[in-house]
Image (spheres, rainbow, N blue to C red):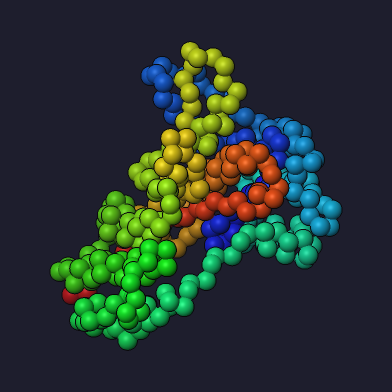
């Protein structure tokens, strides 16, 4: 069971048999052992596969709420009771055993106390430290690039007389460095931040400054970009593989995956990048990327459960994160 919150964090209670794709789409069926052409795969009966997935669940592995009701049972009952062709029903989410905390329809399937329990299962984002707030307060009167340059040249991100400590002060230095590297973009002729660019431009000039370097504070962790394959999904897709003459199936290729740097790397999050967002969360691109990301996060988290051997005292602390990056309405520079 995956809980998808508005802050992008995800938690999951492990269920036996969960994790199969029953939404009629493939995460990524590209293979990597030979170039032979596979036979055409028949379109599955989604209702039958969903019911088969539910039948494989072990009740002892389901998410039991304090009300004694089982979350998986509630989702299954809602699915079976849905009116055929109801476009408002979140079929893709339910088939992948996912709860979206922003979905009012799903909220109505639970009573108030149950919904609060589900929402509280997602850890809140940590608050910034007082030191971090004081460091950024240096910029509160900045209105021009000249003001910004003056603050950067005459003040320090560290408190006066303080020696840099990587654990305490990494965030302060990261924010200061990101602002410094944005300054040339602010001052460049032609206002590049107001122009439309290809997806890679935003990754290089925006997201790498804001996110990639921020993650350097996490020990033995890396953010791999440019069509990174989800290994957790690949492991799930090949877990029943016994024929060495067939090609192994790979996981979906995401625009970024957060993983450990170990040889047997573990994955903690993924991201998809949209070059331009036109304000609609119902566009084909947005919906496809959203589902693709949710399914990959589900597999990452399922693998985490396996790694801790489903220890309930540890499972509650597990978490993966998903992000979607986009540029809002490229602005044209004024004459």
Front residue of 175/203: it is 175
Q: Residue at x 28, y 55 (%)?
A: 204
Splitting the image into 4 quarters, where does residue 206 fall?
Answer: bottom left
Mark count: 0
Residue 303 image offset from top left, x and y in percent: 58, 39
Which residue occupies the extreme bottom position in the image?
Answer: 141
In the rendered view of the protein, which quadrant contains the C terminus?
Answer: bottom left
Q: Can residue 329 be seen?
A: no
Residue 78 image offset from top left, x and y in percent: 76, 49
**Up-down relation of residue 103 to residue 35 (above or below):** below
Q: Residue at x 25, y 77 (%)?
A: 152
Front residue of 327/125: it is 125
Front residue of 75/297: it is 297
Q: Residue at x 50, y 41 (%)?
A: 266
Front residue of 93/210: it is 210
Which residue occupies the extreme right position in the image?
Answer: 68
Residue 200 image offset from top left, x and y in percent: 29, 51
**Up-down relation of residue 212 to residue 232 (above or below):** below
**Up-down relation of residue 94 to residue 65 (above or below):** above
**Up-down relation of residue 185 to residue 291 (above or below):** below
Q: Can residue 299 be seen?
A: yes
Report whether 208 appears left or right of 308.
left
Q: Residue at x 44, y 26 (%)?
A: 31
Report whether 163 appears left or right of 267.
left
Report whether 228 appears left or right of 113.
left
Residue 115 image offset from top left, x and y in percent: 73, 62
């Amino acid at each position: 069971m995956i809980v998808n919150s508005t802050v992008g964090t995800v938690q999951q209670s492990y269920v036996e048999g969960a994790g199969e794709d029953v939404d009629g789409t493939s995460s990524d069926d590209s293979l990597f052992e030979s170039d032979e052409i596979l036979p055409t795969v028949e379109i599955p009966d989604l209702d039958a596969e969903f019911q088969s997935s539910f039948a494989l669940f072990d009740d002892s592995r389901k998410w039991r709420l304090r009300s004694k009701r089982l979350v998986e049972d509630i989702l299954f009952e809602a699915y079976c009771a849905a009116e055929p062709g109801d476009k408002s029903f979140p079929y893709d989410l339910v088939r992948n055993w996912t709860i979206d905390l922003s979905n009012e329809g799903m909220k109505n399937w639970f009573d108030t106390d149950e919904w609060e329990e589900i929402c509280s299962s997602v850890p809140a984002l940590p608050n910034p430290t007082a030191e971090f707030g004081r460091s950024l307060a240096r910029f509160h009167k900045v209105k021009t690039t000249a003001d910004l340059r003056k603050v950067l040249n005459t003040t320090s991100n560290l408190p006066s007389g303080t020696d840099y400590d990587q654990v305490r002060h990494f965030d302060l230095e990261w924010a200061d460095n990101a602002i410094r590297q944005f300054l040339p973009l602010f001052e460049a002729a032609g206002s590049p931040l107001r122009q439309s660019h290809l997806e890679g431009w935003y990754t290089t000039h925006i997201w790498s400054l804001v996110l990639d370097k921020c993650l350097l504070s996490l020990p033995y962790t890396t953010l791999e970009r440019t069509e990174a394959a989800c290994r957790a999904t690949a492991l799930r897709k090949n877990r029943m593989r016994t024929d060495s003459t067939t090609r192994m199936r790979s996981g979906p290729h995401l625009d970024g995956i957060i993983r450990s740097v170990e040889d047997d790397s573990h994955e903690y999050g993924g991201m998809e990048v949209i070059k331009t967002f036109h304000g609609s969360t119902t566009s084909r691109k947005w919906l496809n990327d959203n589902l693709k990301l949710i399914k990959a996060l589900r597999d990452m988290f399922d693998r985490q459960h396996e790694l801790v051997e489903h220890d309930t005292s540890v499972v509650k602390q597990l978490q993966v994160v998903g992000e979607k990056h986009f540029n809002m309405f490229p602005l044209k520079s004024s004459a």
